[in-house]
Protein backbone atom coordinates (compact mmCIF):
# COMPACT_ATOMS: atom_id res chain seq x y z
CA UNK A 1 0.00 0.00 0.00
CA UNK A 2 1.17 3.50 -0.63
CA UNK A 3 2.65 5.89 1.92
CA UNK A 4 0.58 8.93 2.97
CA UNK A 5 2.39 11.71 4.81
CA UNK A 6 0.12 13.97 6.86
CA UNK A 7 1.47 17.41 7.78
CA UNK A 8 -0.42 18.78 10.78
CA UNK A 9 -1.37 15.29 11.95
CA UNK A 10 -2.38 16.34 15.47
CA UNK A 11 -5.11 18.74 14.34
CA UNK A 12 -8.90 18.61 14.15
CA UNK A 13 -8.68 17.04 10.68
CA UNK A 14 -5.13 15.67 10.75
CA UNK A 15 -5.61 12.90 13.31
CA UNK A 16 -8.93 11.61 11.89
CA UNK A 17 -7.35 11.62 8.41
CA UNK A 18 -4.40 9.60 9.71
CA UNK A 19 -6.69 6.96 11.22
CA UNK A 20 -8.86 6.90 8.08
CA UNK A 21 -5.94 6.03 5.80
CA UNK A 22 -4.30 3.71 8.34
CA UNK A 23 -7.53 1.73 8.79
CA UNK A 24 -7.56 1.13 5.05
CA UNK A 25 -4.07 -0.34 5.02
CA UNK A 26 -2.05 2.71 3.94
CA UNK A 27 1.36 3.39 5.48
CA UNK A 28 0.85 6.63 7.40
CA UNK A 29 3.32 9.11 8.88
CA UNK A 30 2.11 12.19 10.78
CA UNK A 31 4.11 15.31 11.61
CA UNK A 32 3.06 18.09 13.95
CA UNK A 33 4.60 20.81 16.13
CA UNK A 34 1.65 20.93 18.60
CA UNK A 35 0.95 24.56 17.66
CA UNK A 36 -2.78 24.21 18.31
CA UNK A 37 -2.33 22.63 21.74
CA UNK A 38 0.29 25.19 22.80
CA UNK A 39 -1.65 28.22 21.64
CA UNK A 40 -4.89 27.00 23.26
CA UNK A 41 -2.96 26.56 26.54
CA UNK A 42 -1.26 29.93 26.20
CA UNK A 43 -4.47 31.82 25.46
CA UNK A 44 -6.46 29.70 27.89
CA UNK A 45 -9.06 28.66 25.33
CA UNK A 46 -9.15 25.03 26.32
CA UNK A 47 -10.59 22.27 24.20
CA UNK A 48 -13.75 20.40 25.16
CA UNK A 49 -11.89 17.46 26.74
CA UNK A 50 -8.27 16.47 27.35
CA UNK A 51 -6.54 14.78 24.42
CA UNK A 52 -3.68 12.27 24.72
CA UNK A 53 -0.42 13.24 23.00
CA UNK A 54 0.09 12.18 19.41
CA UNK A 55 2.40 9.37 20.52
CA UNK A 56 -0.17 8.14 23.03
CA UNK A 57 -2.87 8.23 20.39
CA UNK A 58 -0.67 6.28 17.95
CA UNK A 59 -0.03 3.68 20.67
CA UNK A 60 -3.75 3.36 21.45
CA UNK A 61 -4.50 3.07 17.74
CA UNK A 62 -1.90 0.31 17.39
CA UNK A 63 -3.22 -1.58 20.40
CA UNK A 64 -6.81 -1.40 19.17
CA UNK A 65 -6.24 -2.12 15.47
CA UNK A 66 -2.72 -3.50 14.96
CA UNK A 67 -1.98 -0.64 12.53
CA UNK A 68 0.96 1.69 12.99
CA UNK A 69 0.84 5.44 12.49
CA UNK A 70 4.41 6.80 12.57
CA UNK A 71 4.82 10.01 14.56
CA UNK A 72 7.33 12.82 14.14
CA UNK A 73 7.14 15.95 16.31
CA UNK A 74 8.74 18.93 14.63
CA UNK A 75 8.23 22.30 13.00
CA UNK A 76 7.86 22.24 9.23
CA UNK A 77 9.05 25.82 8.99
CA UNK A 78 12.43 24.10 9.14
CA UNK A 79 13.12 23.23 5.49
CA UNK A 80 15.57 20.48 6.47
CA UNK A 81 12.88 18.62 8.43
CA UNK A 82 10.53 18.94 5.45
CA UNK A 83 13.18 17.62 3.09
CA UNK A 84 14.05 14.69 5.39
CA UNK A 85 10.43 13.53 5.17
CA UNK A 86 10.98 12.89 1.47
CA UNK A 87 14.52 11.45 1.60
CA UNK A 88 13.78 9.36 4.70
CA UNK A 89 17.18 10.36 6.17
CA UNK A 90 17.92 11.90 9.59
CA UNK A 91 14.38 11.47 10.80
CA UNK A 92 13.70 11.30 14.49
CA UNK A 93 10.59 9.19 15.07
CA UNK A 94 8.78 9.61 18.38
CA UNK A 95 6.87 6.43 17.63
CA UNK A 96 7.38 3.60 16.89
CA UNK A 97 10.98 3.16 18.05
CA UNK A 98 11.93 1.35 14.84
CA UNK A 99 10.09 2.99 11.97
CA UNK A 100 9.16 0.50 9.24
CA UNK A 101 9.09 2.87 6.28
CA UNK A 102 10.59 6.28 5.60
CA UNK A 103 10.58 8.82 2.80
CA UNK A 104 9.05 8.60 -0.69
CA UNK A 105 5.41 9.28 0.17
CA UNK A 106 3.12 8.83 -2.82
CA UNK A 107 0.76 11.40 -1.29
CA UNK A 108 1.20 14.26 1.15
CA UNK A 109 -1.81 15.85 2.83
CA UNK A 110 -0.95 19.40 3.88
CA UNK A 111 -2.91 20.66 6.92
CA UNK A 112 0.07 22.21 8.73
CA UNK A 113 -1.31 25.73 8.95
CA UNK A 114 -2.65 28.25 11.42
CA UNK A 115 -6.37 27.79 10.60
CA UNK A 116 -8.20 30.55 12.46
CA UNK A 117 -9.41 33.82 10.93
CA UNK A 118 -9.93 35.50 14.35
CA UNK A 119 -6.46 34.41 15.56
CA UNK A 120 -4.90 35.85 12.40
CA UNK A 121 -6.46 39.22 13.22
CA UNK A 122 -5.82 39.45 16.96
CA UNK A 123 -2.85 41.77 16.33
CA UNK A 124 0.10 42.31 13.99
CA UNK A 125 2.10 39.54 15.66
CA UNK A 126 -0.54 36.84 15.13
CA UNK A 127 -1.01 38.14 11.57
CA UNK A 128 2.74 37.82 10.99
CA UNK A 129 2.78 34.34 12.48
CA UNK A 130 -0.11 33.25 10.28
CA UNK A 131 1.51 34.53 7.10
CA UNK A 132 5.00 33.27 7.88
CA UNK A 133 3.92 29.85 9.14
CA UNK A 134 1.42 29.12 6.40
CA UNK A 135 3.49 30.40 3.50
CA UNK A 136 6.86 29.05 4.62
CA UNK A 137 5.50 25.58 5.31
CA UNK A 138 3.81 25.55 1.90
CA UNK A 139 6.94 26.83 0.19
CA UNK A 140 9.13 24.27 2.00
CA UNK A 141 6.75 21.56 0.84
CA UNK A 142 6.76 22.77 -2.75
CA UNK A 143 10.56 22.82 -2.95
CA UNK A 144 10.96 19.47 -1.18
CA UNK A 145 8.59 17.79 -3.64
CA UNK A 146 10.15 19.51 -6.69
CA UNK A 147 13.72 18.63 -5.64
CA UNK A 148 13.29 15.21 -4.07
CA UNK A 149 10.01 13.56 -4.99
CA UNK A 150 8.38 15.17 -8.05
CA UNK A 151 5.85 12.37 -8.50
CA UNK A 152 4.34 12.90 -5.04
CA UNK A 153 0.73 14.11 -5.15
CA UNK A 154 0.21 17.13 -2.88
CA UNK A 155 -3.27 17.43 -1.39
CA UNK A 156 -3.49 20.90 0.12
CA UNK A 157 -6.39 22.01 2.25
CA UNK A 158 -7.70 25.28 0.85
CA UNK A 159 -10.79 27.15 1.93
CA UNK A 160 -14.00 28.42 0.37
CA UNK A 161 -13.14 31.70 2.10
CA UNK A 162 -10.52 32.33 -0.59
CA UNK A 163 -13.35 33.23 -2.98
CA UNK A 164 -15.13 35.47 -0.47
CA UNK A 165 -18.77 36.21 -1.30
CA UNK A 166 -18.81 37.47 -4.91
CA UNK A 167 -21.99 38.56 -6.64
CA UNK A 168 -21.57 35.82 -9.29
CA UNK A 169 -21.68 32.00 -9.11
CA UNK A 170 -18.48 30.49 -7.64
CA UNK A 171 -16.94 27.90 -9.95
CA UNK A 172 -14.66 25.06 -8.84
CA UNK A 173 -11.38 26.90 -8.84
CA UNK A 174 -11.26 28.13 -12.43
CA UNK A 175 -13.07 30.61 -14.65
CA UNK A 176 -12.99 31.12 -18.43
CA UNK A 177 -12.68 34.79 -19.29
CA UNK A 178 -13.29 36.42 -22.68
CA UNK A 179 -11.59 39.77 -22.97
CA UNK A 180 -11.37 41.96 -26.07
CA UNK A 181 -12.05 39.03 -28.36
CA UNK A 182 -9.59 36.64 -26.71
CA UNK A 183 -10.14 33.89 -24.13
CA UNK A 184 -8.16 32.23 -21.34
CA UNK A 185 -8.71 30.16 -18.20
CA UNK A 186 -7.72 31.67 -14.84
CA UNK A 187 -7.96 30.89 -11.16
CA UNK A 188 -11.41 32.03 -10.02
CA UNK A 189 -11.10 35.58 -8.56
CA UNK A 190 -10.23 35.61 -4.87
CA UNK A 191 -11.04 38.21 -2.22
CA UNK A 192 -10.61 36.92 1.31
CA UNK A 193 -12.08 38.31 4.52
CA UNK A 194 -9.13 37.69 6.87
CA UNK A 195 -5.35 37.44 6.98
CA UNK A 196 -5.75 33.68 7.49
CA UNK A 197 -7.92 33.36 4.37
CA UNK A 198 -5.49 35.61 2.47
CA UNK A 199 -2.62 33.27 3.42
CA UNK A 200 -4.61 30.44 1.82
CA UNK A 201 -4.95 32.44 -1.42
CA UNK A 202 -1.18 32.85 -1.42
CA UNK A 203 -0.77 29.10 -0.83
CA UNK A 204 -2.89 28.38 -3.85
CA UNK A 205 -0.81 30.81 -5.91
CA UNK A 206 2.41 29.10 -4.78
CA UNK A 207 1.07 25.67 -5.67
CA UNK A 208 -0.19 26.82 -9.07
CA UNK A 209 3.25 28.32 -9.72
CA UNK A 210 4.82 24.94 -8.83
CA UNK A 211 2.47 23.13 -11.22
CA UNK A 212 3.07 25.49 -14.13
CA UNK A 213 6.80 25.76 -13.62
CA UNK A 214 7.92 22.32 -12.47
CA UNK A 215 5.05 20.02 -13.33
CA UNK A 216 3.95 19.33 -9.75
CA UNK A 217 0.71 17.40 -9.13
CA UNK A 218 -1.55 19.26 -6.71
CA UNK A 219 -5.13 18.99 -5.50
CA UNK A 220 -6.54 22.04 -3.67
CA UNK A 221 -9.58 21.25 -1.52
CA UNK A 222 -11.59 24.43 -0.97
CA UNK A 223 -13.32 23.51 2.24
CA UNK A 224 -16.10 25.30 4.13
CA UNK A 225 -16.46 25.30 7.94
CA UNK A 226 -16.37 21.72 9.25
CA UNK A 227 -18.50 20.36 12.07
CA UNK A 228 -18.71 17.16 14.07
CA UNK A 229 -16.46 15.02 16.14
CA UNK A 230 -17.06 11.33 15.53
CA UNK A 231 -15.67 9.31 12.64
CA UNK A 232 -15.77 5.58 11.91
CA UNK A 233 -12.34 5.23 13.51
CA UNK A 234 -12.75 7.52 16.54
CA UNK A 235 -15.59 5.40 17.88
CA UNK A 236 -13.21 2.44 18.31
CA UNK A 237 -11.84 3.99 21.51
CA UNK A 238 -12.98 7.18 23.25
CA UNK A 239 -9.36 8.36 23.55
CA UNK A 240 -9.06 8.48 19.76
CA UNK A 241 -11.52 11.38 19.43
CA UNK A 242 -10.27 14.44 17.63
CA UNK A 243 -9.69 17.79 19.30
CA UNK A 244 -12.84 19.90 19.62
CA UNK A 245 -12.79 23.67 20.05
CA UNK A 246 -15.85 25.81 20.78
CA UNK A 247 -14.07 29.04 21.73
CA UNK A 248 -14.16 32.23 19.66
CA UNK A 249 -10.72 31.59 18.18
CA UNK A 250 -10.67 28.01 17.00
CA UNK A 251 -14.28 26.82 17.22
CA UNK A 252 -16.26 26.77 13.97
CA UNK A 253 -19.81 28.02 14.09
CA UNK A 254 -21.80 24.76 14.25
CA UNK A 255 -19.54 23.23 16.90
CA UNK A 256 -19.86 26.47 18.88
CA UNK A 257 -23.66 26.51 18.64
CA UNK A 258 -23.88 22.88 19.81
CA UNK A 259 -21.85 23.65 22.93
CA UNK A 260 -23.78 26.89 23.54
CA UNK A 261 -27.07 24.97 23.33
CA UNK A 262 -25.87 22.53 25.98
CA UNK A 263 -24.81 25.15 28.52
CA UNK A 264 -27.83 27.40 27.91
CA UNK A 265 -25.74 30.19 26.38
CA UNK A 266 -27.75 32.11 23.74
CA UNK A 267 -26.57 31.12 20.25
CA UNK A 268 -24.17 33.86 19.13
CA UNK A 269 -25.44 34.88 15.68
CA UNK A 270 -23.09 37.58 14.36
CA UNK A 271 -24.77 40.62 12.82
CA UNK A 272 -27.87 40.01 10.70
CA UNK A 273 -27.06 36.30 10.45
CA UNK A 274 -27.71 36.17 6.71
CA UNK A 275 -24.07 35.26 5.97
CA UNK A 276 -24.12 32.10 3.84
CA UNK A 277 -21.34 29.51 3.88
CA UNK A 278 -20.94 25.96 2.61
CA UNK A 279 -20.68 23.39 5.42
CA UNK A 280 -19.30 19.87 5.68
CA UNK A 281 -19.41 17.04 8.23
CA UNK A 282 -15.97 15.85 9.38
CA UNK A 283 -16.82 12.35 8.07
CA UNK A 284 -17.23 13.83 4.59
CA UNK A 285 -13.89 15.65 4.83
CA UNK A 286 -12.31 12.22 5.19
CA UNK A 287 -14.23 10.83 2.22
CA UNK A 288 -13.16 13.82 0.13
CA UNK A 289 -9.47 13.63 1.01
CA UNK A 290 -9.51 9.91 0.24
CA UNK A 291 -11.28 10.50 -3.10
CA UNK A 292 -8.65 13.12 -3.94
CA UNK A 293 -5.89 10.64 -3.08
CA UNK A 294 -7.41 8.05 -5.42
CA UNK A 295 -7.72 10.58 -8.28
CA UNK A 296 -4.37 12.35 -8.55
CA UNK A 297 -3.90 15.04 -11.19
CA UNK A 298 -1.47 14.66 -14.07
CA UNK A 299 1.93 16.32 -13.85
CA UNK A 300 1.51 20.11 -14.16
CA UNK A 301 -2.17 20.06 -13.18
CA UNK A 302 -3.82 21.81 -10.25
CA UNK A 303 -7.14 20.10 -9.49
CA UNK A 304 -9.49 22.25 -7.43
CA UNK A 305 -12.64 21.01 -5.71
CA UNK A 306 -15.12 22.98 -3.64
CA UNK A 307 -15.35 20.82 -0.52
CA UNK A 308 -18.81 21.58 0.90
CA UNK A 309 -21.98 19.52 0.97
CA UNK A 310 -24.72 22.13 1.56
CA UNK A 311 -25.14 25.83 2.27
CA UNK A 312 -26.85 27.63 5.17
CA UNK A 313 -27.23 31.12 6.54
CA UNK A 314 -26.14 31.52 10.16
CA UNK A 315 -29.81 32.17 11.02
CA UNK A 316 -30.78 28.83 9.46
CA UNK A 317 -28.09 27.04 11.49
CA UNK A 318 -29.23 28.70 14.70
CA UNK A 319 -32.90 27.80 14.04
CA UNK A 320 -32.01 24.17 13.24
CA UNK A 321 -29.88 23.76 16.36
CA UNK A 322 -32.49 25.50 18.51
CA UNK A 323 -35.20 23.12 17.29
CA UNK A 324 -33.04 20.01 17.66
CA UNK A 325 -32.00 21.02 21.18
CA UNK A 326 -35.59 21.85 22.13
CA UNK A 327 -36.72 18.35 21.03
CA UNK A 328 -34.39 16.78 23.60
CA UNK A 329 -35.19 19.11 26.44
CA UNK A 330 -32.73 22.00 26.09
CA UNK A 331 -34.24 25.48 26.07
CA UNK A 332 -32.16 27.56 23.69
CA UNK A 333 -32.28 31.30 22.96
CA UNK A 334 -30.82 32.95 19.87
CA UNK A 335 -29.06 36.28 20.26
CA UNK A 336 -28.04 38.63 17.45
CA UNK A 337 -24.73 40.05 18.64
CA UNK A 338 -22.80 42.92 17.04
CA UNK A 339 -20.69 41.32 14.34
CA UNK A 340 -17.06 41.27 15.50
CA UNK A 341 -15.96 40.61 11.89
CA UNK A 342 -15.99 42.72 8.76
CA UNK A 343 -18.01 40.57 6.38
CA UNK A 344 -21.10 40.97 4.19
CA UNK A 345 -24.16 40.07 6.24
CA UNK A 346 -26.50 39.79 3.24
CA UNK A 347 -25.14 38.60 -0.08
CA UNK A 348 -25.52 36.35 -3.10
CA UNK A 349 -23.89 32.91 -2.71
CA UNK A 350 -24.07 30.16 -5.28
CA UNK A 351 -21.01 27.89 -5.32
CA UNK A 352 -20.68 24.89 -7.62
CA UNK A 353 -19.64 21.81 -5.62
CA UNK A 354 -20.30 18.94 -7.98
CA UNK A 355 -16.72 17.72 -8.45
CA UNK A 356 -16.36 15.65 -5.28
CA UNK A 357 -19.91 14.31 -5.57
CA UNK A 358 -18.92 13.10 -9.06
CA UNK A 359 -16.01 11.23 -7.45
CA UNK A 360 -18.53 9.26 -5.38
CA UNK A 361 -18.85 11.07 -2.04
CA UNK A 362 -22.00 10.20 -0.10
CA UNK A 363 -22.78 13.33 1.92
CA UNK A 364 -23.83 13.39 5.56
CA UNK A 365 -26.28 16.28 5.81
CA UNK A 366 -27.03 18.52 8.78
CA UNK A 367 -30.51 17.53 9.96
CA UNK A 368 -32.49 17.78 13.18
CA UNK A 369 -31.59 14.16 13.77
CA UNK A 370 -27.85 14.58 13.17
CA UNK A 371 -27.76 17.72 15.34
CA UNK A 372 -29.48 15.84 18.17
CA UNK A 373 -26.85 13.09 17.96
CA UNK A 374 -24.08 15.71 18.14
CA UNK A 375 -25.72 17.36 21.13
CA UNK A 376 -25.93 13.99 22.87
CA UNK A 377 -22.26 13.26 22.17
CA UNK A 378 -21.02 16.66 23.33
CA UNK A 379 -23.36 16.57 26.35
CA UNK A 380 -21.14 13.83 27.86
CA UNK A 381 -18.40 16.43 28.30
CA UNK A 382 -20.58 19.25 29.63
CA UNK A 383 -18.67 19.56 32.90
CA UNK A 384 -15.55 20.57 30.94
CA UNK A 385 -17.27 23.47 29.13
CA UNK A 386 -15.83 26.86 30.01
CA UNK A 387 -18.38 29.53 29.10
CA UNK A 388 -15.73 32.28 29.41
CA UNK A 389 -14.18 31.31 26.08
CA UNK A 390 -17.41 31.54 24.08
CA UNK A 391 -16.89 35.28 23.62
CA UNK A 392 -13.46 36.74 24.25
CA UNK A 393 -13.82 39.98 22.31
CA UNK A 394 -11.69 39.59 19.19
CA UNK A 395 -12.79 41.90 16.40
CA UNK A 396 -11.52 43.46 13.24
N1 LIG B 1 -20.36 33.03 13.07
C1 LIG B 1 -21.43 33.46 13.87
N2 LIG B 1 -21.35 33.20 15.20
C2 LIG B 1 -20.30 32.55 15.78
C3 LIG B 1 -19.23 32.12 14.97
C4 LIG B 1 -19.30 32.39 13.61
O1 LIG B 1 -22.40 34.05 13.38
O2 LIG B 1 -20.32 32.36 17.00
C5 LIG B 1 -20.43 33.26 11.62
C6 LIG B 1 -19.23 34.00 11.07
O3 LIG B 1 -19.40 35.41 11.19
C7 LIG B 1 -19.18 33.50 9.63
C8 LIG B 1 -19.72 32.08 9.71
O4 LIG B 1 -20.40 31.99 10.97
O5 LIG B 1 -20.05 34.26 8.81
C9 LIG B 1 -18.64 31.01 9.69
O6 LIG B 1 -17.70 31.29 10.69
P1 LIG B 1 -16.69 30.18 11.27
O7 LIG B 1 -16.00 30.75 12.45
O8 LIG B 1 -17.39 28.88 11.44
O9 LIG B 1 -15.72 29.98 10.02
P2 LIG B 1 -14.46 30.81 9.49
O10 LIG B 1 -13.96 31.84 10.45
O11 LIG B 1 -14.80 31.30 8.13
O12 LIG B 1 -13.32 29.72 9.38
C10 LIG B 1 -13.57 28.31 9.40
C11 LIG B 1 -12.27 27.61 9.74
C12 LIG B 1 -11.26 27.85 8.64
C13 LIG B 1 -11.86 27.46 7.30
C14 LIG B 1 -13.16 28.20 7.07
C15 LIG B 1 -13.88 27.79 5.81
O13 LIG B 1 -11.77 28.07 11.00
O14 LIG B 1 -10.07 27.11 8.90
O15 LIG B 1 -10.95 27.73 6.25
O16 LIG B 1 -14.06 27.91 8.17
S1 LIG B 1 -14.76 29.13 5.06
O17 LIG B 1 -15.62 29.77 6.08
O18 LIG B 1 -15.56 28.63 3.97
O19 LIG B 1 -13.77 30.09 4.62
Image (cartoon, helix red, strand yellow):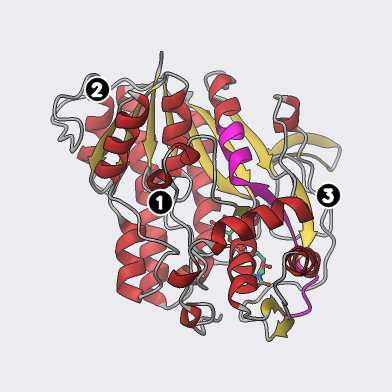
Using the numbered discs, state the Cα–Cα distance from disc 1 to disc 2 in whole angstroms: 25 Å
Q: In the picture provided, is 332 more to the left or to the right than 274? A: left
Residue occupying image coordinates x 83% and y 66% = 347
Residue 37 vertical position relative to residue 98 in the rendered view, above or below: below
Residue 282 colored magenta? Answer: yes
Q: Residues within 10 Å of mark 2 (few under 14, many from 20)?
A: many
Whether residue 163 is visible: no
Q: Quadrant of ligand 1?
A: bottom right
Number of the front mark, 2 or 3: 2
Q: Which residue is mark 3?
A: 169
Q: In the picture provided, is 242 more to the left or to the right than 258? A: left
Residue occupying image coordinates x 45% and y 36% = 236
Q: Quadrant of the N terminus?
A: top left
Q: Which residue is mark 2?
A: 102
The stretch in magenta equals: 271-289
Of 322 and 205, the residue lying toward us: 322
Which of the two discs, 1 and 2, labels the residue nearer the N terminus?
A: 2
Q: Which residue is mark 1?
A: 135
Q: Quadrant of the C terminus?
A: bottom right
Residue 386 vertical position relative to residue 367 in the rendered view, above or below: below
Q: Secondary structure at mark 1?
A: helix
Q: Position of residue 18 (x, y in %)?
A: 42, 34
Amino acid sequence: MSHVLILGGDGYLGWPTAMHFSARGYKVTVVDNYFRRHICDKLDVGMLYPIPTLVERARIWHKQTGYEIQVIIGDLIDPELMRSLFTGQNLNYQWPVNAKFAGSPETVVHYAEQPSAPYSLMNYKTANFTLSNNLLVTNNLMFAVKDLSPDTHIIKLGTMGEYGTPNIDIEEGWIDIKHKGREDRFLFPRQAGSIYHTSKIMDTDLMWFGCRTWGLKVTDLMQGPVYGMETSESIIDDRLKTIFNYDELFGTVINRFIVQAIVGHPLTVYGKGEQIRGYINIRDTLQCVHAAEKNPPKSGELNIYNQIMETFTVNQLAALIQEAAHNIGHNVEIEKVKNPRIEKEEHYYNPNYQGLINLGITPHYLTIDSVQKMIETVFKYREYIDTNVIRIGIQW
